[in-house]
Image: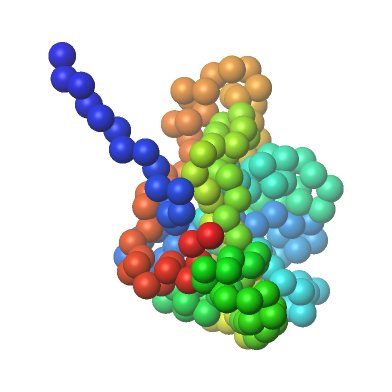
Amino acid sequence: MNDQHVAPEPRFRVRARHTDTTVTVYQAYHPRIGGPAVRTGRFPADWKRDRMTWIKPSFLWMMYRCGWGTKEGQETVLAVEIRRDGFEWALRNACLSHHVPALHGDRASWRRRLREAPARVQWDPERDLRLDALPHRSLQLGLAGVAAARYADEWITGVEDVTPLAAEIHALVRTGDLERAAALLPEERPYPLADEVLAHLRA
C-alpha cells in the first residue's frame, strides 16, 4: 500500500477559479444592486464608487460572509469575472490592512502607505463546507478610489448570479450530504503569481 504524503496548504496563497485571462471573485449585494449587475454585466448607477468594495476569490469565504445569501443586504451572490491583469495590478499596489513591522517599519509609515494605496489586503481563515475555519488563509482584496473605478469600468468581463448555487449547496450541507455539496463547489485552483507580487502582502 502506497503512503501518499499530502503537502499542507501554504498559509498564504491565492486560490481561485481562473482562466488564462480572467479570475472569478465573489460579492454579495442587495437585489437592487445585484439584479441590474447580472442583467447588464455592470454595476448600476447607485453602486457606491466612493466606498471601498471587497472582492473575494473564495466561494466558501463569501458564503461565510453572507450566510449563504441569507443576510440582509447580501441576498444576491455574484460571481464576477474580471481581467487577470487588473486583479494583479490591484495586488501589486495593495497594502496590508494591518501593521507588520517586518514589512512596513514603523506604524506611521504603514498608516501613510495604507492611506495612499488604492487597494488593501487582509487574510482571513479559509472556510470548509460547514463554514468552520481552516488553518490556511483566504485573500480578501479591498478596492478604493482608482482601483474601484477600474474594477467597475474596465476589469469586469461577466457577472453571474450564483445565489441558486449557494442555496443548493447550503441545502445539501444542512442534510449532511457533504460529498454532493463538495461536488457542486466552483473549482478553485492555486492562482499563479510571481513571488514578488505577494512578498509585501504576506502577513
Residue 130: quarter of image? top right
The picture places residue 201, in percent across and down from the top left corner, at 50, 67
The picture places residue 120, in percent across and down from the top left corner, at 61, 70
**Side of 108 where 85 appears, left or right:** left
Q: Which residue is farthest right? A: 72
Q: Residue at x 69, y 54 (%)?
A: 28
Q: Residue at x 29, y 33 (%)?
A: 6
Q: Which one is nearer the viewer's eye here, 48 or 109? A: 109
| Quadrant that contains the N terminus | top left
**Side of 23 where 153 appears, left or right:** right
**Side of 96 where 111 appears, left or right:** right
The picture places residue 88, in percent across and down from the top left corner, at 44, 73
Q: Which one is nearer the viewer's eye here, 94 or 102? A: 102
Residue 147: quarter of image? bottom right
Q: Is residue 163 above or below residue 102?
A: above
Q: Is residue 187 above or below residue 173?
A: below
